[in-house]
Amino acid sequence: MAAGVAAWLPFARAAAIGWMPVANLPMPVAPTEKNKRQDELIILNVSGRRFQTWRNTLDRYPDTLLGSSEKEFFYNEETKEYFFDRDPDVFRSVLNFYRTGKLHYPRYECISSYDEELAFFGIVPEIIGDCCYEEYKDRKRENAERLMDDQEDNKDAKLPNMTFRETMWRAFENPHTSTMALVFYYVTGFFIAVSVITNVVETVPCGSAPNQKEVPCGERYTVAFFCMDTACVMIFTVEYLMRLFAAPSRYRFMRSVMSIIDVVAILPYYIGLVMTDNEDVSGAFVTLRVFRVFRIFKFSRHSQGLRILGYTLKSCASELGFLLFSLTMAIIIFATVMFYAEKGSSSSKFTSIPASFWYTIVTMTTLGYGDMVPKTIAGKIFGSICSLSGVLVIALPVPVIVSNFSRIYHQNQRADKRRAQKVQKARLARIRISKTGSSSAFLHSKRNGLFNEALELTNSTEDEQRLSKSTSLLESQHHHLLHCLEKTTNHEFVDEQYYQQSYLEAGLQNYPSRSPSLSSQDGVTGTCCTRRSKKHHTPLPNASAPAHMQPLTHTHTHPQGLQELSTIHIQPLSTSRSSLNMRVDEPAPLNCQSSQITTAIISIPTPPVTTPEGDAHLPAGPTHQNVVKVSAL
Amino acid sequence: MDAKRVETISARVDAAVSSSDSVEDELELSAVRHRPEGLEQLEAQTRFSRKELQILYRGFKNECPSGVVNEETFKDIYSQFFPQGDASTYAHFLFNAFDTDHNGSVSFEDFVMGLSILLRGTVQEKLNWAFNLYDINKDGYITKEEMLDIMKAIYDMMGKCTYPVLKEETPRQHVEVFFQKMDKNKDGVVTIDEFIDCCQNDENIMRSMHLFENVL
């Protein structure tokens, strides 16, 4: 619960009077303030600077140093003030947090000293307000990076217990870890370059003997080139196998892009080995050699920029797709038009619409080879329209792609921004948790509160002392308010998982008939039935419903061996005048329609609950109590 | 409650002259400040002691530095007490109940008068206040629709995760029970007399009226 509104708790409680006439159940007792003190000023002396505030202000956050009894350790008897030997400047922010409920981070403050002060006073940094949070996180990240850089400089020893496989993988992924890795990195790079150059040079026509026509070098020096090729492929194969061996998840490695490129790079060679002399497939074999050019993509392991480019293209897929689509549309339109426009002219190159595609593409991209030109007037007119529109169609999606690329590039440059976004999610999750913390605090203390009241019943004082948790008065008042709301609406607050659990459970169970109220007496508990069960209740013992009263007991053992409270759920069946075989498929097992109530279970503890007509008897005793209060309405 | 002084910093003349109204309106809103009447007057009008008024005002001013609460802030504050559900509808009704002069904002006087009734008033006054809360259109009768609205608002505060699971017709049933109890002459509306009568005869309600007396 936020601090500032702690002052409004009296108002919220007073407004609860609005529920009273509507409620059908009696309200729980309000928590009494046993030792109500008049609000007093307390003096906090922080390294000589005196701050003063109300005691209530500090009590708003009982889980911090100043809000709890921990500050008594710092109480100075002679001067009647609390003395802290800390930084007074940062203390300003800390005290303002109590006053306003918002924690601010001053820009001039060093991040580590601020963190230290917060830790000293028991304040979690996550609650820094949104106005200052980004700054705080930025500074924190810079600090962390600085620390990491320092660490990396000092770090040259390997982590002690890494298997050989892990070291190999680490060496492959990050060449700077060891000299062996670096050597390997450069060697493979060299061989990739050699392989690519070989492929290229193979096709260059070398000088030839005068009476022979020019042959490419590949055919002249077949053996040499073959040896080079073999050497490169050997290296690549070994590298691939080593990576495969070292990969932590081989399946995932084999599916990754880089490994596919590796395979594609070396496969043609092996296929070529297998089927050398077969004339029929030699044509196919030649095609396969084209794939050798993919070796150049192996460079992407060596170049960060290439990887970024690939990633950009992948992420701009939709824009590229749109570009392609719009171009295709335009090409088809203009090709059709040009074809029909040039149909009349003789010796026209526009023999068919697909043939016109070539003209359209060349014109739209403003290439203009000139191998196909329109000759008719109409053709020329449409041709000019085509070239003008080509500029437009291409010019429009391209800036989108360019901006995408630059955005991704900068994002990659500051890869930590991605880390920050994850942290933001974590922060929101933490804030959400702390918010739900207040509701779970209520549920938690409800359980404790029930135990407290049960103890009061049985007059065991020692246990009471043991159990009295130090919830602040504020909290207990807030919980009392929520309790009143529960009573008004006759429903209970439960936490997420219990709710889902009961939802599921109830869906699984089929309850037999609903009987109308045996006697709808207007007891104090007018309408529905409630079932109180403790938080950690064991799942419903599946009731095989006999034809009469069926108790379903839930027992719950408290670790300290206190009195157990269990609820008895009684469900009378059969003797019903109305439809016997009506199945109840509703979520909550005991949900009752207006005039068809069956049971009322009242669990013990609240003493002011003088439940209706049931006879209340409380068997005293140690564990395993069955407290039964039954009232059939 | 008549001596309310509202000071606006931006002069009305300027507002009339300047072009963009929305900016001026915003300036006006943010500059509206409200100073309550003096402590003695409030002491006389309410049943709070001087010290209690001081404590109340400090809390009030802390949350609303401008001195008045508008409905949004009111809803925000009230919602913080009920994290699991949606308290805004009920807060709306509460706001209308507190804002006795219906000017769209609750000043400290409104606030303290309301609290005085709720915490220190007689049972009659409290019931009167509750009736006023339920009677949304302030015509002196609580109809079933009005009651249904209120009931839904109350159930909304419970939120989703309740046990037993909240059903659609639960508020309606509750309203039926309420009317069965309160509407003596079965004319479909509850008047103030029926209401007070019935509540006074109901032990539980009587007892719960005294529940919050030691709140401050």
Image (cartoon, coloured by chain):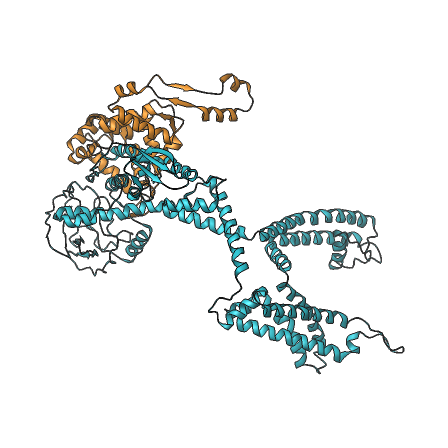
Chain colours: A cyan, B orange
Q: Is residue A619 above or below residue B68?
A: below
Placement of the C terminus of chain A among the 4 image quadrants:
top left
Picture quarter containing residue A234? bottom right
| As drawn, A242 above or below A619 | below
Residue A250, given in percent of the width and then of the height, sits at: 52, 70
Q: Nearer the viewer, residue A291 or B77?
A: B77
Could you tell me how many numbered marks the image carries? 0
**Could you tell whether A503 is left or right of A560 in the image?**
right
**Residue A442 quadrant:** top left
Observer-nearest residue: B103 or B55?
Answer: B55
- Quarter occupied by the N terminus of chain A: top left
Q: Residue at x 57, y 74 (%)?
A: A241
Q: Is residue A291 visible?
A: no
Residue sitting at the far bottom: A277
Residue drawn 52% across the image and 49% down it: A142
Residue B82 seen: yes
Residue A450 lies left or right of residue A107; in this view the side is left
Location of residue A348 (image quadrant): bottom right
